[in-house]
Amino acid sequence: MVEKIKILFMSDWGDTGFGTVGKEVCVRLAEMEIFEVHYLGWHANPNDVGFAKANGIILHTTHFWNAADQFGKDSFNPIVQQIQPAVVLTLGDPWMVDHVQACPARDSFQWLAYVPIDRDVISVPWQSQMRKPDCLVLYSQFGMDVIEDQIPFRNPRLVLHGVDRQTFKPWYPEGTTPDMPLSEIQRARKKTLGAQFVDKFVVGFVGRNQIRKGIPFVFKAFKAFNCATWVERQNVTDAANEKEYSAEEFCREKQCFRCDICPAFQQRPETDTSIIYLHTTRGDGASHHDRPGIGWRIDELGHRYGLHGRVAITPNLDALKGLPRAALAQVMQCFDVHAFLSHSEGYGLPIAETLACGVPTLVTNYSSMPELVSKGGGVAIDVRAYDTFTTWENEWAIPDIGHAADEIVKIHADEEYATQMRKAAAENDYTPDWHFVALEFRRLILEAAGQAVS
């Protein structure tokens, strides 16, 4: 019997983007039966070991009670010494996994670093860190272009993230068929979310409640979509200064879409029952992963924008523990449009997953996001400005609220257009199936281990 190649995968284990990717890939690598798959899971605990074992994965937990071991900094070296992997595969930002290079046994394994690139200027420390792995693996074409420009001769490899198309696909509840009017299908879908949603136009968001995700942009775009002054492009008179503005001048330039305090806001009667549905945490939970400063207090945003009774949220979510994947797909199906107006993304799994469900998706036209909607079913929203954030001097995009609101209006007002968008979204095959992603990693791992690639 041929000895299996030992792999140590290191990343998050919870229901985060990193955790989802890690489990989807490692389960499939284990199924190939040529790898012994070990997983050093950040935020994993001993209760997770049985689930991992049932899926062919040997899970090693970090000392999650020890803040210093948050990214396996203390656990990594002893585990490498114990299992002696041929290949270490990490998934995380460079600063999260930089301790791999300092391992005393570094010469004994090949290091494949699967790295997100979510900005178009890479800080000097990141450039230094990304020269250390034996193989740098990126997961967007945007990332490839940035690295090839700023770290020449690095020879990165491209492996896109994936989507489980057996789970994330258009769903037709009992009694509905694809040739029925979209409004009837959506009513049936929304019944599963709750009777109070059946006749509502739902603007959805799926993502972690953290600053980079730009959740307030969803509220701003939703509020502008509700405003007759903007949607009907009404002129606005400033009596005090005896001046008249066009809606473009007033809403975009003077008011900067501060619809929460705008004296010209007028609620459109045809949208006064529309709602925002957020699949995220409330931002004021007991967990240190869900508190003000990391993200936003959702209830405060709803209050500030005057959306009383019009903001819904998935109950009882934790930043590291979400719904089962099939339940998440069912929630997504209820969205009439997914507004994912993030500042920047290394990939954006919720974009790929909502598209696969056939949901029209709006994304910020920056970083990897526009390539995910490039094959249909979504719109890349214009960038209004850029800002430089404190974490590694990230360059972040500010989406154009007016453009986003206009796209929501089109989907709300025109059922034929919405139907076409949903069809195009479901047919968008830019994001591959996870099986293809796992096969790409099989090839890279075999190359790294000096084995023949068949």
Image (cartoon, rainbow, N blue to C red):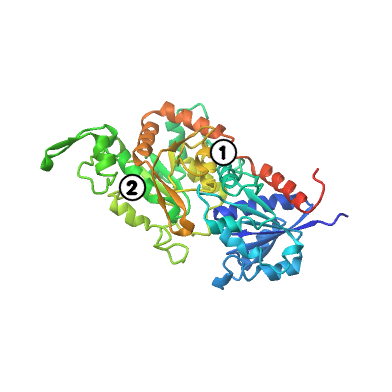
**Residue lying farthest to the bottom in this orientation:** 66
- Direction right: furthest residue: 1
Q: Residue 47: percent from the left, percent from the top?
A: 62, 66
Indicate which disc, 2 or 1, sits on the residue closer to the N terminus.
Answer: 1
**Looking at the image, can residue 228 be seen?**
no
Q: Looking at the image, which is closer to me, 323 or 152?
A: 152
Q: How crowded is mark 2: few (under 14 residues within 10 Å), some or many (20 or more)?
A: some
Q: Quarter of the image holding residue 379?
A: top left
* Residue position for label 2: 310
The type of residue carrying mark 2 is Arg
**Which residue is located at x 37 percent, y 50 percent?**
216
Residue 185 vertical position relative to residue 445 in the rendered view, above or below: above
- Place of residue 404 in the rendered image (x, y in percent of width and height, measured from the top left): 38, 39
Residue 141 percent coordinates (x, y): 58, 41
Residue 162, placed above or below residue 1: above
- In space, the residues marked 2 and 1 are separated at their CA atoms by 27 Å
Q: Which residue is depicted at the point 62% across and 47% down?
A: 152
Q: Is mark 2 on a helix, strand or loop?
A: loop
In the figure, is residue 10 to the left or right of 279? right
Q: Is residue 391 visible?
A: yes
5, 197: nearer the viewer: 5
Q: Residue at x 72, y 66 (%)?
A: 80
> Circle 1 is placed at which residue position?
169
At a point 59% along the width and 58% down the height, the residue shown is 128
Position of the C terminus, as image quadrant, is top right
